[in-house]
Image: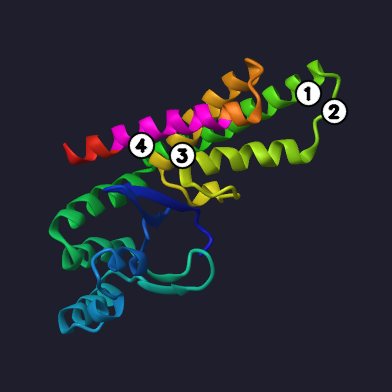
Amino acid sequence: MSARIVPIDYEGQAVRFNAEGWINATEAAARFGKLPHDWLRLPDTVAYLEALSKYGKIPQLVRTQRGRAGGTWLHPKLAVAFARWLDVGFAVWCDEQVDALLRGDAKPWASARREAAIGHRAVCDAIALNCEAQGKTPQRHHFINEARLINQVITGSFAGRDRDQLNAAELELVTLAELRDTALICAGKAFAERKANLMAYVGGLQRKHVRRIAA
């Protein structure tokens, strides 16, 4: 599947579509303790697939993919019917997302991804300027460790993350942490000071997010 994967936030978790409106049915079904195979073998589903293939002239409605974005993927013509089998509320939300993707209106994720890239660039520039002010040459590990610091204060793990797999809400949190970190670096704060400050800052943002969902 060559189309770009688009993770979209649904109640705090990512549901993966691609830019053509296909949905990762395996991931979506797992949220509700179900399997795509159980829906695909229902008599009504089989009849619907046959009708779509015949009258809609759609050559492929179901795809199986391995790897990072692996699982069963369903054509956008199937996405809402499948989502309705999972949960009515999820089906309404899914319909809106597929419609936006097919219209080319799915800009929130792309914008959030671009903003996170800019935030990372700002952190890198701050590190380089800080090193130059001290008469040092910035090294690759300086940039890697700072990116891992951002991930640690958000996830608790001092490791890298593939940002293309994050949803818009996660990317927004990364960007806010990066902007804060940039200011701390420019203020001459040491690594340990930045870590403590960022943990308190990100913790506050995450608590606000939880309260907003619960409200």
Identity, as a three-letter code, of the amino acid under mark 3:
Leu
Secondary structure state at the residue bearing disc 4: helix
Q: Which numbered disc, 1 or 3, marks the residue that appears first in the sequence? A: 1
- Tell me the residue at 66%/17% (across/down): 188
Query: Residue at (19%, 66%) from the top-left corner?
Result: 86
Q: Mark 1, mark 3: which one is toward the viewer?
A: 1
Q: Amino acid at mark 4?
A: Gln
**In this orientation, does residue 60 appear?**
no
State whether residue 198 appears in this view. Answer: yes
Q: Which mark is residue 171?
A: 3
Measure the alpha-carbon separation of dots 4 and 3. Answer: 13 Å
Q: Which residue is mark 4?
A: 206
**Label 2, on which residue?**
137
Q: Earlier in the sequence, mark 4 or mark 2?
A: 2
In the picture of the structure, the residue carrying the numbered disc 1 is 131
170 in the magenta segment: no
Prevalent SS, magenta region: helix
* SS state under label 2: loop
How far separated are the C-alphas under marks 1 and 4? 31 Å
Q: Position of residue 133 (x, y in %)?
A: 79, 16
Residue at point 27% right, 66% down? 78
Q: Are marks 1 and 3 in contact (CB under 8 Å)?
A: no
C-alpha distance separating marks 2 and 3: 30 Å
